[in-house]
Amino acid sequence: MRLVMYGLLGAVVGFIGMYLMLSVQLNFNFLTIAYPVNVVLTTLTLLLLVYVGVSILQMRKKANSTVSGDAEDERDIWLYKKFSDTNMIVIASVVFGIASVAISIITEQATWLETSSIIIGTAAFILSLAVTSLVNSFFPDRKLPSISEKDYGKKLLAASDEGERHVMLEGLYRSFNTLNTTLILGLFLLIFYSVFTGTSQLFAIFLIGAVIIGANAQYYLLIRNKS
Amino acid sequence: MKTRLKELRARNGLNQTELAKRAKVSRQTISLIEREEFIPSLLIAVRIARIFNEAIESVFLFEEEEIE
């Protein structure tokens, strides 16, 4: 019930916000600000990558340190939290990287900016894989799958114990609900945007719709077949 | 469910990581059980109780209304 209320509230706020924005800037042309936005996004991605690189070095150093007693537990907790934070940052850097590559290619920016965006975007993707594979070096005695293995997600879930799965379930279920709500809200915003600006967003609407249906079908078919 | 895990761990001079290795679970799972945020499966409960040479019901304490 609370989720529905939040969804409706979000839809109302989103509608009013978008309506006001569009009524003020109906003739807004993104091309006029594409260059500074591209530079900011590329720089931001680079800064996040530096943070991720430093975090990887810090985690490696910490993981190789010899400690015992309560300090061993504290090290594990530190690594766990740092790993989660780094994962969050690396995902943001991948998204910003993709966005900067998209802007530079779609709006045909200068070659140096296009090249920088592509290099930094690719680096973000590679670093995201490096961060994911770090967990194997933290727990060498556990039989965790390698990121390059087929069905990595399934194997990682199978290698996790019941406490870890309990935490993952809580996080993933909340994330799943948030995604469902925000993607539906996104569909409405795209419709309003298309209507008010005359720029069709139908491709994005179909794409997001297919993602929502696909993800939900995957979830409900799985729980249905476990009856 | 209440648990005496922290007390038993301190008495036996075990940190969470060592207990986790002996019980063949992650340190996170031990931490969750200690914070009473997660009720372990019977298998893990038996393993933990055995490590401390205690009966399950003296490590994991249920209120009467929880069992009824």
Image (cartoon, coloured by chain):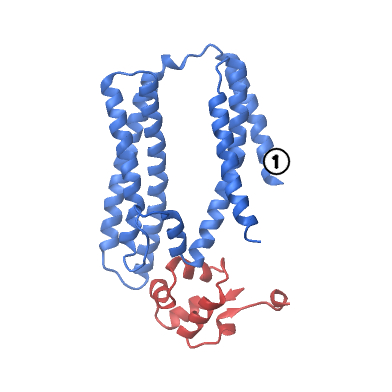
**In this structure image, what is the colour of chain A?**
blue
Q: In which quarter of the image is the N terminus of chain B?
A: bottom right
Q: In which quarter of the image is residue B25?
A: bottom left
Badge 1 element? helix
Residue in the image at 36% along x and 58% along y: A79
Where does the image place residue A177, in percent across and percent down from the top left?
60, 46
Q: For this rendering, which residue is in front, A81 or A71? A: A81
Residue A53 in the image: above or below residue A116: below
- Give the residue number, with chain letter if any, for mark 1: A5
Q: In this view, does A54 lie to the left or right of A205?
A: left
Tell me the red chain: B
Residue at (61, 79) in percent of width and height: B61
- Farthest top residue? A27
- Give the chain letter at badge 1: A
- Residue A6's x, y, as percent? 66, 40
- Residue A117: image location, x then y, percent: 31, 29
